[in-house]
Amino acid sequence: MTTELELAKGVKDTPPEEKLIKNEVIDRIKKIFELYGYLPLETTILERYETLAAKFGAGEASDALKEVFKLQDQGGRNLALRFDLTVPLARYMALNPTIKLPFKRYEVGPVFRDGPIKLGRTREFWQMDIDVVGTSSMLADAEIIAMTSAVFAELEFDVFIKVNNRKLLNGILEDLKITNKEEVLISLDKLDKIGKEGVSKELLEKKVSKKQIEGIFDILQPGITLKELKNKIKDKQGLEGIEELEEIFLYLEKMGIKNVLFDLSLSRGLAYYTGTVFEAYLKEGIITSSLAGGGRYDEMIGKYMASENKVPAVGISFGLVPIMAVLKNIKKELILTPSKVYVLPIGVYNESLALVQTLRNKGIASEIDLTKRGISKNLAYAGTLGIPYVVFVGENEVKQGRFKLRDMKTGEEELLLLNEILKKLNSSLTKNL
């Protein structure tokens, strides 16, 4: 294969059978978003590099900024491909300051990161985001977490959602007199990936003393509770983080959300988080990375507006690449076509065209032979694509006004009037939805 035909590293085409599943996933998730009253928004893929690199955006120490795809236009302006959907939302809000608040939005689209490649992680990937802009109430955080639980229930995924608070983490670091908090939190976010030893090595490189590192891990014990932390934390901001978490867990309890747990090691690597942070993981399966993640970022939008006033916001991103990887692993049969009926003309195309249009007009996804192939080849085609029904249209059928309907799964055939075919198809297809 010549290099002209090779894919760029870390990207892939989406064939029809995967795209059909992806469309279904997006539709089902959007249904949950709109059930909670969120509005669709579409922002640009191409941004000014300065917008993404702003210290109140990704932050210079963030791994995300190191993974940005950079380019220049013909005017020599520095541009970049967006690495998430949050910074573009902040930029959009800054450019549209008269939007009625709170603004509840969702967005679906591709983002790009020039980072390492593994199962469930590529360099071009789609995200689905939900955000609430304009309220600092923990009700918004609880609603985002509840909606995340509802999304994965809709997809029939067994997940758990980790929740923490950056104020609490900052308070711990403040008590330990650690000044480069953002850099330290970025390292702590890798605890699940590189372990205590790897994090400790990074922290030493960031000029954190051995005593301070010991102090971090003395508190960062698995299973530690908020009640226990109240007796360990002295910093005012840290105690505020505990109070916010207690409030969120109370709201979640009232909403009946049970698959949520407190995890003190969760920090998320982006610099813009200011409060609650959360991530969703599959309880069991081949995908060990998070399926969704987000948090509260109360300072970013106000700073993009060059305003002293905070514009509070909270949101979460769903990664369609890992979600698709999970679905492909558990889905027994791939959908290869949206078509439910294949009309097979036997020498009578005019009547067949009228029939296929009738099916389509009744909302039944249908296709017709376009090649004038023989019966066996047409049946093989319908069978390969998994089209559930075939309707035969020949001279005898047209004369009788009855058409042979074959169930491709069972092989059973019936000679039916058109209205009987419509009734049977509607009944059968509705059951299989």
Image (cartoon, rainbow, N blue to C red):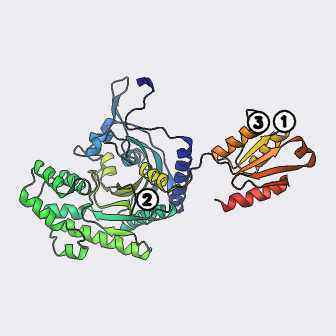
Residue at image coords 13%, 51%: 201
Q: Which mark is residue 347?
A: 1
Q: Position of residue 126 (x, y in %)?
A: 44, 46
**Mark 1 is on which residue type?**
Gly
Left or right, residue 386 beside residue 99 = right
**Does label 1 or label 2 sit earlier along the sequence?**
2
Residue placed at 62% from the left, 45% from the top? 337
The alpha-carbon separation of the residues under discs 1 and 3 comes to 10 Å
Mark 1 or mark 3, earlier in chain: 1
Q: Position of residue 415 (x, y in %)?
A: 85, 53
Distance (Cα) linking label 1 and label 2 = 62 Å
Residue 311, image x, y percentages? 34, 55
Indicate which disc, 3 or 2, sits on the residue closer to the N terminus. Answer: 2
Q: Is residue 116 left or right of residue 428?
A: left
Q: Position of residue 23 (x, y in %)?
A: 55, 49
Judge from the rendering whether residue 392 lies leftward or rightward of residue 334; answer left or right: right
Mark sitting on residue 102: 2
In this view of the protein, can residue 236 be seen by the observer?
A: yes
For disc 3, the neighbor class at 10 Å (few under 14, some 14 to 19, many from 20) is few
In the structure shown, which secondary structural element does the residue marked by tag 3 occupy?
Answer: loop
Placement of the N terminus among the 4 image quadrants:
top left
Binning the other alpha carbons within 10 Å of mark 2 as few (below 14), some (14 to 19) or many (20 upward) gives: some
Q: Nearer the viewer, mark 3 or mark 2?
A: 3
To which residue does mark 3 refer? Answer: 374
Asked if residue 176 shows in the view, the reply is no
Whether pointer 3 and pointer 2 mark residues with C-beta atoms closer than 8 Å, the reply is no
Question: Could you tell me the amino acid type at mark 2?
Answer: Pro
Tag 3: amino acid? Gly
Tell me the SS state at disc 1. loop
Q: CA distance from mark 3 to mark 2?
A: 61 Å
Q: Secondary structure at mark 2?
A: loop
Residue at 14% x, 62% y is: 216
